[in-house]
Amino acid sequence: MAEVEVKDSGKGGKKGQQKKMKIHVDFTPMVDMNMLLITFFMFCTTLSKPQTMEISMPTNDKVPEEEQNKVKESEAITILLGDNDRVFYYLGQPKYEDYTSLVESSYGADGLRALLLERNKTVVNKVKDLKERKKRKEIDEVAYDSLVSEAKKTKGSPVVMIKAKLADENGKNGASYRNLIDALDEMIICDIGRYAIVDMTEGDLFLMENYEKKGALSDQIDTALKN
Amino acid sequence: MAKVKVKKKSTLIDMTAMSDVTVLLLTFFMLTSTFVQKEPVQVSTPSSVSEIKIPEINVLQVLVEPSGKIFISLDKQEDRVNVLNAMSSMYGVKFTPEQINKFRLANSFGVPIKQMPGFLDLKSDIQDQTLKNYGIPCDSTNNEFKEWVRAARKTNPDLKIAIKADQSTPYDKIKNVMSSLQDIKENRYNLLTSLKSLPAEEENN
């Protein structure tokens, strides 16, 4: 493959002059091999590393009533993840007799996010400010992280309860894993510091059903209460 | 008739530059990419804005496929052997050295412990084909998943638990896994997601 071309310098060449050598190495097989290797790497490896979302769940240990943290009614937001990618929320205590207390929302930018950004304005602004300062190199990464987590503890910031609907007996009409991640995602975007994944109660199911039927079930409560 | 004379031209192309480029590309791929892990089922994870990267070692990955079957993968071979031994003494299932060796080389596992010896006796290509039909039992009557995780935590306290689930998995199945982890006091874990960029108004600011 490697060709060495010897050029005759002719008759007039001086004695003792070095012969000029021209060396050609054919790189075609080398390129072939490299291409094969590249193809192999492209098919058998991934460039993207998976992202993770860190969550911590409460322990199962029973906490005595007095030691439990009570959530202020004005701060509480409950998000209900329904079937077919639908999502509802209510503020504060559930009002079972009033079906309009439950609001249907969406996972899009003008749904939950708009609500949470509005409710969590002070924290969002604080975090924005900190981000700006980090960009200007006024604070470093470590200070930024601690300041952000401090800002998230601001009093009056909303506490969000995420309740996902379980499937019925046929294994249908439940919330999916993506719904849960989407909801958790909104927590990150809106800088919500305090949120929890809670089991859905009968009352929540009733709220959703009542919403579906436009308050037709409200009468049942009255009769149930009277009995 | 005058013959058209075809000039003889040398067709040698200098491939050196081409070779340079390919070597560069190859180096890039070798340095930046990681090998695809063999998984019993392909799942597509939901996307999120979270930017935390998963650590490369000491990860216990729980794979949940859409119908709720659970598979576990451990990245260290010695951990796998220790966990299998712990499980074998707990459930009274004996393994031969060959079976243990096969288990050590398998990337992920997800077979009920009673069927494990028979499964490990199969040829590895049949194993790959049939693994997706099994899954680790994780219900209230027979929760082997809990025991696997507990055993893994005992052998390697630095383990991080990562849940990788398909986005269409019903919430029930995820809740099952989460409450099993809660039962054994594993309260901090990761949910694997794929990257989605931050919403526009956040990036502009």
Image (tube, helix red, strand yellow):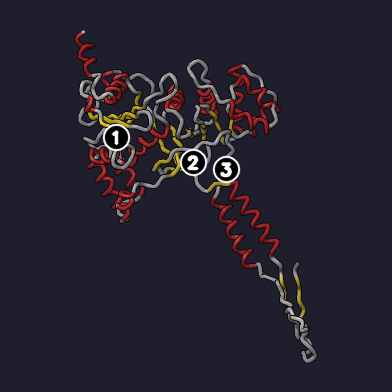
The mark closer to the camera, 3 or 1, is 1
Q: Residue at x 54, y 51 (%)?
A: B32
Q: Residue at x 62, y 52 (%)?
A: A39
Whole-Å distance between the Cαs marked 1 and 2?
36 Å
Q: Secondary structure at mark 3?
A: loop
Q: Position of residue B162 (x, y in %)?
A: 48, 34
Left/right of residue A143 with respect to residue B34 in the rendered view: left
Pick whichever of labels 3 and 2 is earlier in the sequence.
Answer: 3
Closest to the observer, A78 or A207: A207
Q: Amino acid at mark 2?
A: Pro
Q: Position of residue A203 (x, y in %)?
A: 29, 20
Dot 2 falls on which chain?
B
Dot 3 falls on which chain?
B
Which quadrant: the N terminus of chain A?
bottom right
Q: Quadrant of residue A186?
A: top left
Labelled disc at residue A130: none
The number of discs equals: 3
Labelled disc at residue B55: 2
Q: Same chain, marks 1 and 2? A: no
Q: Amino acid at mark 1?
A: Ser
Mark 2 nearby-residue class (10 Å; few <14, some 14–19, many ≥20): few
| Residue B101 position (above or below residue B88) | below
Residue where numbered disc 1 is placed? A105
Residue where numbered disc 3 is placed? B36
Whole-Å distance between the Cαs marked 3 and 1?
39 Å
Q: Same chain, marks 3 and 1? A: no
